[in-house]
Amino acid sequence: MLAALVPLVVLWQLATRAALSGRWRRDERGDVPGWVMIVVMTAAIVVALTAVAKDQLQDMLSQALDSVTK
């Protein structure tokens, strides 16, 4: 167990030293392309699920709403 933690501690120390020395400077904009990719992929998953299971999703929503109103 302890032997598995040693590489993680070493990597953490290297990352901390690199960050403190200024080698890893973050851009003020952040990770815009990464967020755009996540949003586009999420939208694609929603569209694909809706296209495949539209009737089932509508039935599930109707049953859920009916059970709340009763």
Image (cartoon, rainbow, N blue to C red):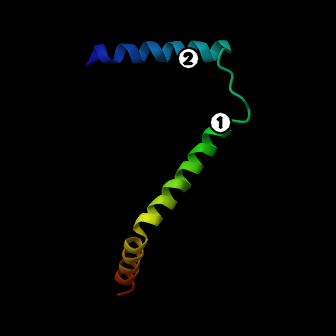
Distance from disc 2 to disc 1, alpha carbons, whole Å, reads 20 Å
Displayed quadrant of residue 60: bottom left
Quarter that holds the C terminus: bottom left
- Relative to 46, is 55 on the left or the right? left
Q: Residue at x 50, y 14 (%)?
A: 13
Which residue lies most toward the bottom here? 70
At numbered mark 2, what does the secondary structure look like: helix, strand or loop? helix
Callout 1 crowding tier (Cα within 10 Å): few <14, some 14–19, many ≥20: few
Q: What residue does disc 1 label?
A: 31
Q: Is residue 53 above or below residue 68?
A: above
Residue 54, which numbered label? none
Image coordinates of residue 46 in percent, x first then y, are: 50, 59
Q: Is residue 24 left or right of residue 9?
A: right
Q: Quadrant of the N terminus?
A: top left
The residue beneath circle 2 is 16
56 with respect to 20 (left or right): left
Q: Residue at x 60, y 13 (%)?
A: 18
